[in-house]
Image (tube, coloured by chain):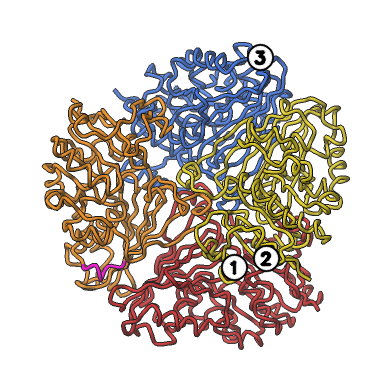
Chain colours: A yellow, B blue, C red, D orange
Amino acid sequence: MSIRVGVVGVSGYSGLELMKLLLRHPVAECAVVAASESTGPKVVSDIHPQLRGSCDLVCQPPDPKVIAEMGVETVFLCTPNEVSHELAPRFLGYGTRVVDLSGAFRLRTEASYGPWYGFEHSAPELLRQSVYGLPECHAREIATARLVANPGCYATSVILALLPLIRAGMLEPGSDICCDAKSGVTGAGRKPRLDLMFGEVSDNFRPYSPIVHRHAPEICQEIGWELEDFTFVPHLLPISRGILTTLYVRFSRPLTIDEIHAEFQRCYRDYPLIRLLGGGRLPDIQAVAQTNCCDLAWRLTARGRRGVLFSALDNLVKGAAGQAVQNFNLMHGLARDLGVTLENHC
Amino acid sequence: MSIRVGVVGVSGYSGLELMKLLLRHPVAECAVVAASESTGPKVVSDIHPQLRGSCDLVCQPPDPKVIAEMGVETVFLCTPNEVSHELAPRFLGYGTRVVDLSGAFRLRTEASYGPWYGFEHSAPELLRQSVYGLPECHAREIATARLVANPGCYATSVILALLPLIRAGMLEPGSDICCDAKSGVTGAGRKPRLDLMFGEVSDNFRPYSPIVHRHAPEICQEIGWELEDFTFVPHLLPISRGILTTLYVRFSRPLTIDEIHAEFQRCYRDYPLIRLLGGGRLPDIQAVAQTNCCDLAWRLTARGRRGVLFSALDNLVKGAAGQAVQNFNLMHGLARDLGVTLENHC
Amino acid sequence: MSIRVGVVGVSGYSGLELMKLLLRHPVAECAVVAASESTGPKVVSDIHPQLRGSCDLVCQPPDPKVIAEMGVETVFLCTPNEVSHELAPRFLGYGTRVVDLSGAFRLRTEASYGPWYGFEHSAPELLRQSVYGLPECHAREIATARLVANPGCYATSVILALLPLIRAGMLEPGSDICCDAKSGVTGAGRKPRLDLMFGEVSDNFRPYSPIVHRHAPEICQEIGWELEDFTFVPHLLPISRGILTTLYVRFSRPLTIDEIHAEFQRCYRDYPLIRLLGGGRLPDIQAVAQTNCCDLAWRLTARGRRGVLFSALDNLVKGAAGQAVQNFNLMHGLARDLGVTLENHC
Amino acid sequence: MSIRVGVVGVSGYSGLELMKLLLRHPVAECAVVAASESTGPKVVSDIHPQLRGSCDLVCQPPDPKVIAEMGVETVFLCTPNEVSHELAPRFLGYGTRVVDLSGAFRLRTEASYGPWYGFEHSAPELLRQSVYGLPECHAREIATARLVANPGCYATSVILALLPLIRAGMLEPGSDICCDAKSGVTGAGRKPRLDLMFGEVSDNFRPYSPIVHRHAPEICQEIGWELEDFTFVPHLLPISRGILTTLYVRFSRPLTIDEIHAEFQRCYRDYPLIRLLGGGRLPDIQAVAQTNCCDLAWRLTARGRRGVLFSALDNLVKGAAGQAVQNFNLMHGLARDLGVTLENHC
């Protein structure tokens, strides 16, 4: 059995990562690739030389009709927000299911798109149909979704760390959550930009978009927290891939390390890729790079009223392409982690 | 005019940085260098090839008597905590003034040394005599000090950002300060360690010693804050030098960006190396690398009750050797920034 | 069907890489891991956190008798030269086949070990039995070997580029071959050393052991060239993994780009992991990182008498663990590239 | 005394480096800066935040007339080849002397510009007047030059290593010189380009423009060697700054290490910034970074007929801005190394 899929926006970093995952996926068969920029027909392996010998597909224009006629059942959009916003409805119109890796269908209210994304949303009904593709939270809805909005990379790292504690009532309602996030540069895409040049990023480290980064509303929507009480400061690391987030929270009552561990274990017992680091261990980016894992750890202050949570993942895998494969698996009734298991990745 | 100085612990990273600063300092003349490890007589430029041609001093054993007899007026100790703890009293005994770059004389209470530094302090009277060498705060005491405890690199970055606001009563008393700090690896010294090898640090990022790092008590002592209310989480950046600290604070009343700017300006108006970034600018490490500057910026959340402060400096310069030179200058009645001005460095 | 294998020296970089490959290998089953240093029983995933959740084996002492009794058919030695030299005969004595990733059994004459490796070889008969494990050259002998000497990482990159042209008589006999090789730091192992610390390697690049590096005799033995005519200069790159080698050669007659291409194609037509870059393409390290590929390219000078060859591979995969898996496959009658195909890796 | 200078093309990496050198130069006074791109008036420190507080000049359009009227005696052109080609004659027309950091006036024959630079040279008479600004070779001509063509960064590293041996007849006439050069990315400029993005350069290493790089003719012109016998292969290092070149040469007779040392010493005895590494030392990039030094070392093969030369420098200092300052000093009768001495830099 094989299921034909397509990848639009293959020329970026998440496009490459997705191609690598699909090439070894036992069921998905990548039948077509498309690049959103019309730079003429190009072989994928000339864009991504790592694929030499394993993929000689030629980039097509992203034509939903043609792609549907090729028998493609699900298409992955690795495209910029605006492009996804335009393409997704057209693919859906031809009956092709969509996993969108952009932010175009993550927020439930269209009014948020102006201030946070800079464009007016033209498909509010799709915002209500789309499912936020975090398999640990929405597996059932993903299974039947026509349109899955793959979560942002920062958002994934934050939600996986906070949601269990919030749902268990362990965080003081209305308290400040300070979220200090650090990401490698592939999170910013592959378009040439001065501030992403090697000479600017190497030997450097800097915050950007503090407080007003567009992943903040997506996070608050999912964890049910007021934006005003959620202070989000992303920083740019001089590495290619990986995110580590440090969260400063206030508990609703004094907690112990073990109580937190128990709650995480309860939530993630069926999720071997969410790894809980007990025994004084702390996460780092190397341990999750090239894997679909999210590593979690936590510390308390002396009196147990406040805590620090750590969350690490690979922004291109669990933060993008790997999670997209999990969503594809759920949408097609396959085992959630097919092709992205611990053995496959690390 | 020249003043003879000595450098003990020249083989480390702050030792090298200090040598470079002293070589171009118009008054200080480095007459002797010593290495705390007895690896036989070694020319400095064989330890630090960057100094080839500019310094052919041979490392001596760190003998306070011999060094005093050479006419050395002030000695810089770039040695581990325990070594400084042992050497400083002996140098002082021969009348040599000491700028100690370790933590051995930073805390005022000897009882703190067991839990935070792992050794019992044997010179409590020196803890009372020593001056915390932050020129922006203690210039007058530094001028007459026999023993200056050069501040820690993290501590410098944090205190310079917090102290003006705390002194002005702008932070809510007793509120939580969350301090997310990120440092390059030279801050951890030059002793071979598996976790500091290139293969472990590169493409990586990780927290370490969260909440219990030994710079926390030094910071709280200087800013007058309870340790329990100060959550300090340092992280290791995959770069050689530089610190960027992100501080999450709560104000005592709603503030504006301009009020904070005004307060910083009032405090640092005579300190051109403390650079205040207005107009939406944010600090980064490249901008302060190889300089004695500390760059500060700040942001408010929507209702102005909480804020984020950013502080960036070079851990080897303002966080170590450059600040040591400022202390030397003050101790000898020279212009505070002699040899470490903006023009000298950048 | 599964074949039980063991990994000795699992704590290093090639040990980790091998574990990752074995975990997803469809036939090999890693039954035992051992660390050459007796640091007490340790879970593999505490040494290599990337393996958390996928491997909870506990490091054993490397006892050949015990390991043989566990039904281990083949053992991989990821140990230093001296340790392999001591362990291999003992494993062979218990009937366990050995793939040795060190240099202890690569040279055919025991007299070479003193000058090049600094120890006297005590098993000259094994030097005659051992097979140099380059699957592209010695597949038949590997299939029946009891002891396979896995080639050095530099050696693999050089031999794969030179051997086809030398065998075809295309290089001028006795002419100089200049071999400028550049490697990432994992090639130097994982023992803490000052010159491999992040602060020393980052922002740096340097030659080491020019002309006298110990991979030179291994290369000359395999390509049949006089050492005096082979100038080998390795350099240390500020990256973790990957080798790129640039070779300057003189042809026996003027050649064209196409003649060289044709000869390479003839030799490597059955080896999809040896990728020939035509059409003006040049290799780079990113394209081969995390794969078992070796990418080759070539250029001529204007009159076609001299040429430049380029060879790129991942020192930990094709230069170590991946090639070891290929040797294991051949030794056990499996498809040569099982578990290390293009799809598995990239 | 001060001499007014101007810097055109201040927004690039060599422009920044030059500004830093001029700020601390005891005689030069930077009176005007210009950016070749008309992005509106911009303060230099907004382009280069490292200059905050030390330079608040506003970028001007590069108007030779206006700049001459400001009393600027010498202008530095840190501009692309085509821009320098257009601007230099106009500055000279107003009596302003020019140090051009581009390649526009380095080659003596205008016919070379089409094939190597891609534009037709319109000022052949200036090619004959311009002086190749290598202070170690052409100090006398530089002193009186109106137009100095500052050498290329690769060219500087190669010529300084080869010229003494060639002039002494120590290289076999007509023999092959293989030049394997490796450079940090700032050598490629600061214009956004996909292949210079952090994600493409980091963890990577690759050759580019092998054999046909445009620094080859400039080198051969200065060392008097046939292009056909000079094989030049540059590579891109994943670091910001620094060049290390490895040269493979054939001697005219068997030489000893000491003979080569003696010849280098004879040539460079008055040049403390050219550092000769005896005693088994090898150069590296860290040792020359941020300095105006060029470090040289050499090795022989066993029979002494062939050798390997190593040359390391900082492409932005000795390979660009530092050398430009040396040329400025010579042009104005100042000490050659004023402002770029060993003490100033390291």
Q: Which residues are magenta?
A: D226-231
Callout 1 touching callout 2 (CB < 8 Å): yes
- Judge if badges 1 and 2 mark residues of a common chain: yes
The amino acid type found where label 1 is placed reads: Leu
**Three-letter code for the amino acid on which mark 2 is drawn:** Cys
- Residue type beneath disc 3: Pro
Q: Which residue is mark 2?
A: A30
Say if residue C314 shows up in the picture.
yes
The residues bearing labels 3 and 2 have C-alpha atoms spaced at a distance of 55 Å
Residue C288 visible in rendering: no
Query: How far from the left and from the top, in percent, is residue C50?
Result: 70, 55
Q: Does B309 sit left or right of C163 as displayed?
A: right
Query: Are there few (<14), some (14-19), or many (20+) residues within 10 Å of tag 3?
Result: some
Comparing marks 3 and 2, which lies closer to the viewer? 2
Q: Position of residue B39 (x, y in %)?
A: 47, 48
Left or right: where does residue D26 sit relative to residue B327?
left
Q: Secondary structure at mark 3?
A: loop
